Image (spheres, rainbow, N blue to C red):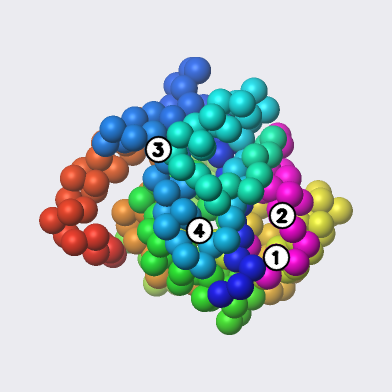
Amino acid sequence: MDNVLAVVAAAGQSRRMGENVNKLLLPLAGRPVLSYSLTALQEAPFVKGFILVVGERELDMYRTLAEQWGCTKMIGLVKGGGTRQDSVWEGLNALPADNRVVIVHDGARPLVTVEQFDRVVSGAMRWGAATLAVPVKDTVKEVSLEDFAIHTLNRESLWLAQTPQAFSYSLLMDAHRLARRDQRIATDDAGLVEAMGVPVKIIQGSYRNIKVTTPEDLSVLEFFLQGRDCLGGCECH
């Protein structure tokens, strides 16, 4: 795998974690949340480097932390934008033009594995775009503005998208350019590619690969980490 680079989105404001809380620096089994994702990228032999996108006021702090965490693959530290989509755009523009495949990952998903990075990159090389996802377990209702259930969706065809996602670099750049031109907003990069009419390959992910959003998520992640050794590092689907 040649010319595989990554953009790590880490500029969110952690609003649902409480005031003045940076969820990426909260301790998780004795380590900051963000350090887990960066370690996985460090350990992935096919990833040649990554861009870390953070808040403007945190640039110096993260530069120091990245050195402490041994992030020798970090090729750039970039100021994020007003939204996640803007932040990823800034990260993409900091990558070299000869990049072939780009991984986009949320720094708030600490239990990502090297094997998951490998599978989405392989998917992007074959199909142009790939994302981790897991099947929906629960019944999903469409709800009216008055909070009444008006439709039950067929969960057999519903999946929950995760990161990492991987794309042909040129394809993802085109998707972001078109979105900026048309003022289109999506909650993930796969959505921007889909809007171009390009299908995104679904790669089976893991229910462990949750995103830290609320304080309760940290407790769940702690539980998963406690069982990782006895499970031999296996994925729990």
Q: Tell me the number on the disc at residue 99.
A: 1
Please give left or right for residue 45 compared with residue 183 in the image.
Answer: left
Q: 52 and 147: which one is in front?
A: 52
Foreground mark, 2 or 3, reads 2
Image position, residue 165 (x, y; %): 54, 61
Q: Is residue 174 left or right of residue 51?
A: right
The residue wearing badge 2 is: 95
Say what amino acid the circle numbered 4 marks: Pro
Residue span colored magenta: 81-102
First reached walking from the N terminus: tag 3 or tag 4:
3
Residue at 74%, 58% (x, y): give it.
96
Question: Is residue 131 left or right of 5 when viewed as pictured?
Answer: left
Contact flag, marks 3 and 4 (Cβ < 8 Å):
no
On screen, residue 55 above or below 126: above
Callouts 2 and 1 close, C-beta under 8 Å: yes
Q: What element carries label 3?
A: helix
Q: Which residue is drawn at 69% across and 60% down?
A: 192
Q: What residue type is labelled 3?
A: Val
Mark drawn on residue 75: none
Name the mark on residue 164: 4
Task: Examine the rendered structure and indicate whether residue 45 appears above or below residue 106.
Answer: below
Q: Quadrant of the C terminus?
A: bottom left
The residues bearing labels 1 and 3 have C-alpha atoms spaced at a distance of 28 Å
User: Whole-percent x and y of residue 20?
Assistant: 50, 18
Given this view, does label 1 or label 3 mark the residue nearer the observer?
1
Residue to which mark 3 is pinned: 33
Q: Is 27 included in the stretch rendered in magenta?
A: no
Q: Earlier in the sequence, mark 1 or mark 3?
A: 3
**Few, some or many residues within 10 Å of mark 1 (<14, 14–19, 20+):** some
Considering every residue shown, the one lying at the far top of the view is 20
